[in-house]
Image (spheres, rainbow, N blue to C red):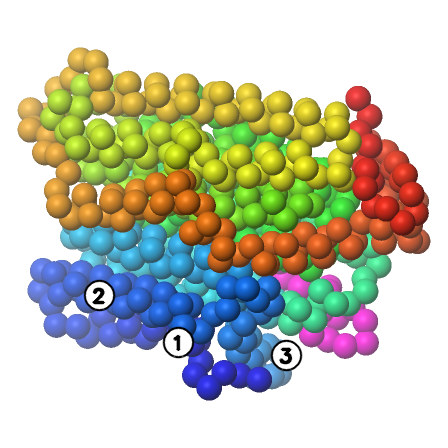
Amino acid sequence: MNPEFPWLTAIIAFPLIAALAIPVLPDTDGKNVRLYALGTGILELCLIIYTFATQYDFNNSSLQLVERYSWIPQLGLNWSVGVDGLSMPLVVLTGVVTTLATFAAWNIKIKPRLFYSLMLVMYSAQIAVFLAQDLLMFFMLWELELVPVYLIISIWGGAQRFYAATKFILYTALASIFILIAALALAFYGDTVTFDITALGLKQYPIELELLAYAGLLIAFGVKLPIFPFHTWLPDAHGEAPAPGSMILAGVLLKMGGYALIRLNAEMLPHAHVYFAPVLAVLGVVNIIYGALAAFSQDNLKRRLAYSSISHMGFVLIGISSFTALGINGAMLQMISHGLIAAALFFLSGVIYERTHTLSMDQMGGIAKSMPTTFALFTFASMASLALPGMSGFVGELTIFLGLTTSDVYSGGFKIIIIFLSAVGLLITPIYLLSMLRRVFFGQQHELSGEVLLDAKPRELSIAFCLLIPIIGIGLYPKIATQTYDSTTVAIAAHLREALPTVAQGENASLYARSTDWKFQTAIRSPTIPSKLVSIIP
């Protein structure tokens, strides 16, 4: 039954409708367009906060504010949206980061009408992805949000913007085909045809179909997260995108991959998740270590931060693979935390680029004297990124480690290996971040066209503080974030654990044993207890 007022549809539609008015808005120098877009973003964020503060029940783990309308009945496509603890905090994160990115684009002078129109369209598409409850609708919105990103990089990016934008659209668009294939295969299986995500999760699929669908979705979402080896588009995109584009790429778009892995792969295909969970844990470790090591070799400031994002997203994979509410809770907290931290770092790198006109760290050096406030803010964000206690990054990563260590699904040896290798990545992270700070802000200052480097202005300070304050708040009192999704992560973990005895005892037990013969072997201790399902061969 639809609510009396379509709150979620209003949240999605408002920025899109506002974008339609920009071409006819009276303006000469772009000032009116900037104010209009910023005002729209602020109103949208207020609408999001008001809706969830007054209409959302934080103790309810089920979908809320569900709206279903017949959209294109010939295709069986319905406008179906809903919100729960998995999507609600990410919608709020989208509102915060996108609104601040719009404010950060204040100095855009080239085609401001087009730029801000694309920002508002992207605003709508991002939120709609998190709220969509129809798989075909989800696929269409997933594709829609690629277009504004592609145009923003290709028009307002750096010298290699066309290469970076083309690589981005090819990787993400081609990978998205797997979403459509999986959606059609799952929808048409059985006696009823449906694209409703909840209904699809209730169907009983052959394990072979689940595994194929899971693998296809993992590729599609692995490109967006990104997971090694599907990550190579991200450093190029970040290196060439304007600062507002990088803020949204790191702060929101990467989180779509993590969200979709939980919503569709884990929640909708839990039996296949039992097979793939150890693989996700291993891929998470590869992401952590590879991303950290690759960051060392980067001279470009934004490319180093891009590889840092790849490393941090590895923790999300480990949390998703844990089969515990604490681990999934940590994956959510890591996505929220990294969204804020990465948006702050990429924004401040844009501030530095506007002054120095370079992203090469070798051509900076010694700018802390000229830009002490920017240096302090950048250092603060870097400390949050390396998981300094008292900041959100520390809480997220610690929760993931605790979630994995308390899991009784994996053997002790496997958990020790995963945690040890992840800890190696944690040790590398402060090294490349502190090295970055040294090269950018200390040492001998280089000649930068004889320009005087101005420190951060009030507008830039306000954007940075809006991102850094919640980083401290979550770090000191994590319940600010975790209470929004606790009930949902508990329900998801319970749902995943229900699939464990089904796989171990049912008709798929022999297939499970064969599929895990490469590194894992079945070790069922009792027909009624799912603990220690996976025993790792040293």
The answer to whether 442 is drawn above or below residue 281 in the figure is above
Q: Which residues are magenta?
A: 179-195
Residue under pointer 1: 10
Q: Nearer the viewer, residue 147 or 492?
A: 492
Instruction: Tell me residue 197's x, y (percent).
Output: 64, 67
Would residue 114 be found to the left or right of residue 371 on screen? right
Badge 3 element: loop
Of badges 1 and 3, nearer the viewer stands 1
Would residue 222 be found to the left or right of residue 342 on screen? right
Distance from the alpha carbon under mark 1 to that under mark 2: 16 Å
The answer to whether 220 is drawn above or below residue 295 in the figure is below
Q: Is residue 480 magenta?
A: no
For image coordinates 41% across by 45% down, the residue present is 477
**Numbered mark located on residue 76 in the image:** 3
Quadrant placement of the C terminus: top right
Q: Earlier in the sequence, mark 1 or mark 2?
A: 1
**Numbered mark located on residue 39 in the image:** 2
